[in-house]
Image (cartoon, rainbow, N blue to C red):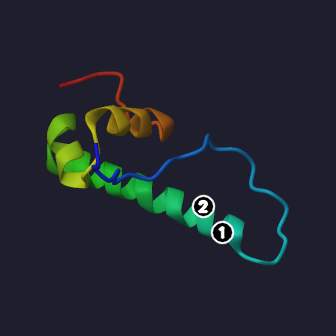
Amino acid sequence: QGRARRFLSVKPLEAPPQSSGDGIENLTLAVASLEKKLLSCALEKTAGNKRRAAQMLGITERILGYKVKHYGLDSPTKL
């Protein structure tokens, strides 16, 4: 299709590896933290509208849904 994918892949959260002194695990945690904040912010700005939040972030609704579930951002009740 030629369309570039514009999302980060996320591995399931697990205990960080033992420090090897290269800072890689710190980068991984920092990226995950930033991604969670961006998702939360987009959902807040769109009042929970996942379609608009996905468009704002430049990802598909499916990827947004996966990431929301992955980070535990989905609320069990809707207002």
Q: Which residue is mark 1?
A: 26
Instruction: Please give the name of the residue rendered at 70% of the width and 65% of the height, measured from the top-left corner.
Output: 25
Q: How many marks?
A: 2
Residue at the farthest top position: 77
Between 78 and 70, which is closer to the camera in this rendering? 70
Q: Position of residue 26 (x, y in %)?
A: 66, 69
Q: Amino acid at mark 2?
A: Leu
Residue type pointed to by label 1? Asn
Q: Which of the 4 image quarters holds residue 48? A: top left
- Against 56, residue 47 (above or below) is above
Labelled disc at residue 3: none
**Element at label 1:** helix
Q: Residue furthest front?
A: 1
If the image is split into quadrants, where does the N terminus sit? top left
- Tell me the SS state at disc 2: helix
For the residues labelled 1 and 2, say whether their Cβ atoms are less than 8 Å apart.
yes
Residue at 63% in and 44% down: 13
Which residue is at a point 61% across and 69% down the rendered structure image? 27
Can residue 44 be seen here? The reply is yes
Q: Is residue 53 above or below residue 79?
A: below
Which residue is labeled 2 in the image? 29
- Residue 38 placement: quadrant: bottom left
At 70% from the left edge and 44% from the top edge, which residue is drawn? 14
Question: Is residue 61 depicted above or below 35 in this figure?
Answer: above
